[in-house]
């Protein structure tokens, strides 16, 4: 089809709001400060990380105010930023003295009193003799931060017999996550204990925290230390659950992505700011997990400095760090990454009777047959070559689809009642769609009337265009163009471009006056305000997976269609053709 024949539709047809992220220190942040609890089911949540604080707790030197401000910030923003857990990476103090340990222990009591989940671990400066491993015995650190401290913690699940290694489980994003907090130097017994924890919790994704693992190998790319190599070889690489490791000790910060034995990514990050102004000022890392966007957004900031009324020249540079090693995003397809040890539980196929809502005109399970399962006689017939497939949208009622490879299409039989339907009271057309990688077949039809507008007495715009057509335009965008009953010309809805190799739920809903297009249950922007009532008809068939111009089938679909349903009324989004599991969870 030539571009000129379609260009007139671009103007025919005479938003979704973006959620704002609260920036610490902004007026917006001040308005949301509170002591609420985080939401364990929300699909956006935050892990807070506190690296080396040793210079703030150094005999008669130092200052506990920065850490106090950091912990208070985490409490105040626990709800607004959905902070579900806090991890300290070791080197709490400088000299392992009891007085220093007592001082920082008192600071952490603010979390204990509120029963906020957090973990700590011993760094080389937290123990009297850093040459010894976790079998070193009793120390001031163990007296204050041993297992006994966490007996009322909501996340603490256990510790090694020596007390220096522990693990926590927190709930976020509707699932449980495990944090391993490992000593600065683990013994053979420590490694055995860690492996046993992973074995007993074999379905949980794991964040490993320790004091030493990687350092900056140059240009912000992390490299293994000698001890880090041992951790990798004896624990990390063969345990696919471990997807993220966090450590301090070295500076400057750096990161890398390594490949484990299972062939999956392990993200290794070092964060430490003790070399910066005021010993780092208790600067923190916020790991913002977004399960829907499949990303972890990382920020580095100093709550202590952000809360000060006036700043000196050095302080102004340290409030928030935005360099590539301090502010970045880590793409993670969480479901795919965790599939080996925690495969997603897909909902079972739905019985046909559960899909037949009031007003169903036609329901086809493409890939299973051509019969109209509504019982209304709107059966399909096939032209050309099509391939049935097990590929399907995870929340589709059936678990089958039909692949259209540009060579075939379907059409309703001549006697199908839907051919003559005018949908005076409104309509809903919905289907599941996936486009292949490298989609290069624009203006191919999904659901199209064979006859042109002129056959139904419509003379406006281009009367050779089909009476109604749901198309895939360039870039994977959608178009619904229809000659309604009340207009001489075409009313057109436009949709946004959709990613390839992804299943989408598409719906066109007309309430008898206006038409709205939805993708995955979300209304799109470019829906016309001019009334458009019903769909004109010449009693001609509907095409599934093809586009026709002047009653000539010109282009078949390149992609997959799964379940497809037509209703003679506007369906509420809660009634859309998705599995019960999707409707219950509110997830697409």
Image (spheres, helix red, strand yellow):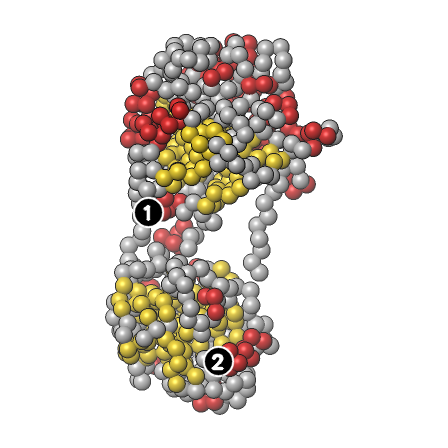
Front one among 223 and 394: 223
Disc 2 target residue:
2
Q: Is residue 93 left or right of residue 160?
A: right
Q: Which mark is residue 110?
A: none
Q: Is residue 71 left or right of residue 257?
A: right
Query: Relative to 476, is 198 above or below?
Result: above
Task: Between label 2 and label 1, give the one nearer the viewer.
Answer: 2
Asked whether residue 522 is in view, the answer is yes
Dot 2 alpha-carbon crowd within 10 angstroms: few under 14, some 14 to 19, many 20 or more: few
* Residue at the extreme front of the image, as rendered: 218
Query: Relative to 152, is 246 above or below?
Result: below
Percent across and percent down for residue 38 are: 50, 37
Disc 1 target residue:
344
In the rendered image, which quarter is residue 379 located in? bottom left
Percent across and percent down for residue 581 are: 36, 52
In the rendered image, which quarter is residue 403 located in? bottom left
Which residue is at 73% across, 28% downward? 312
Query: Relative to 134, is 383 above or below?
Result: below
- Which quadrant is the C terminus positioned in? bottom left
Percent across and percent down for residue 26 are: 67, 40
Check disc 2 and report its element: helix, strand or loop.
Answer: loop
Label 2, label 1: how many angstroms apart (C-alpha)?
Answer: 44 Å
Which residue is at 62% across, 16% downward? 62
């Amino acid at each position: 089809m030539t571009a000129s024949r379609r260009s007139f539709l671009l103007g025919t047809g005479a938003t979704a709001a973006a959620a704002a992220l609260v920036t610490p220190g902004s007026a917006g942040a001040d308005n949301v400060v509170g002591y609420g609890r985080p939401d364990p089911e929300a699909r956006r949540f935050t892990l807070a990380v506190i690296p080396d604080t040793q210079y703030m707790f150094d005999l008669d030197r130092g200052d506990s105010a920065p850490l106090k401000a950091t912990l208070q910030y985490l409490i105040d923003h626990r709800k607004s930023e959905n902070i579900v857990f806090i991890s300290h990476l070791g080197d709490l103090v400088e000299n392992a003295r009891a007085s220093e340990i007592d001082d920082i222990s008192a600071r952490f009591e603010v979390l204990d009193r509120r029963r906020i989940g957090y973990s700590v671990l011993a760094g080389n400066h937290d123990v009297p003799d850093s040459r010894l491993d976790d079998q070193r015995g009793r120390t001031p650190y163990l007296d204050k931060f041993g297992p006994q401290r966490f007996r009322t913690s909501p996340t603490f699940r256990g510790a090694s017999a020596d007390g220096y290694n522990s693990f926590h489980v927190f709930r976020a994003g509707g699932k449980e996550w495990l944090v391993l907090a490992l000593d600065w130097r683990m013994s053979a017994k420590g490694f055995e204990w860690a492996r046993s924890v992973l074995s007993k919790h074999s379905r949980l994704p794991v964040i490993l925290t320790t004091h030493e693992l990687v350092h900056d190998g140059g240009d912000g790319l992390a490299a293994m230390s000698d001890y880090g190599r041992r951790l990798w070889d004896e624990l990390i690489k063969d345990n696919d659950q471990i997807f993220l490791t966090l450590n301090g000790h070295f500076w400057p910060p750096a990161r890398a992505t390594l490949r484990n034995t299972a062939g999956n990514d392990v993200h290794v990050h070092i964060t430490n700011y003790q070399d910066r102004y005021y010993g780092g000022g208790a600067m923190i890392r916020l790991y913002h997990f977004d399960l829907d966007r499949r990303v972890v957004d990382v920020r580095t900031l100093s709550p202590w400095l952000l809360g000060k009324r006036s700043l000196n020249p050095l302080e102004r540079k340290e409030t928030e760090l935005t360099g590539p090693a301090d502010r970045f995003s880590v793409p993670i397809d969480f479901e795919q990454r965790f599939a080996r040890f925690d495969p997603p539980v897909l909902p079972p196929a739905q019985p046909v009777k559960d899909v037949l809502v009031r007003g169903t005109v036609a329901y086809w399970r493409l890939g299973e047959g051509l019969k109209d399962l509504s019982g209304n006689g709107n059966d399909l017939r096939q032209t050309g070559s099509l391939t049935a497939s097990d590929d399907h949208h995870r929340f589709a009622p059936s678990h089958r689809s039909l692949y259209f490879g540009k060579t075939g299409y379907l059409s309703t039989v001549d006697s199908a009642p839907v051919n003559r339907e005018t949908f005076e009271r409104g309509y809903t057309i919905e289907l599941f769609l996936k486009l292949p990688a490298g989609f290069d077949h624009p203006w191919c039809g999904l659901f199209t009337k064979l006859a042109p507008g002129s056959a139904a007495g419509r003379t406006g715009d281009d009367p050779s265009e089909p009476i109604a057509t749901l198309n895939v335009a360039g870039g994977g965008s959608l178009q619904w163009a229809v000659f309604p009953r009340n207009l001489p010309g075409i009313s057109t809805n436009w949709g946004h471009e959709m990613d390839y190799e992804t299943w989408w739920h598409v719906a066109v809903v007309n309430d008898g006056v206006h038409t709205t297009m939805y993708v995955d249950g979300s209304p799109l922007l470019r829906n016309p305000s001019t009334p458009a009532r019903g769909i004109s008809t010449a009693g001609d068939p509907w095409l599934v997976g093809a586009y026709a111009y002047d009653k000539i089938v010109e282009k078949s679909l390149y992609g997959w269609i799964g379940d497809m349903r037509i209703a003679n009324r506007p369906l509420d989004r809660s009634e859309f053709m998705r599995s019960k599991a999707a409707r219950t969870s509110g997830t697409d």
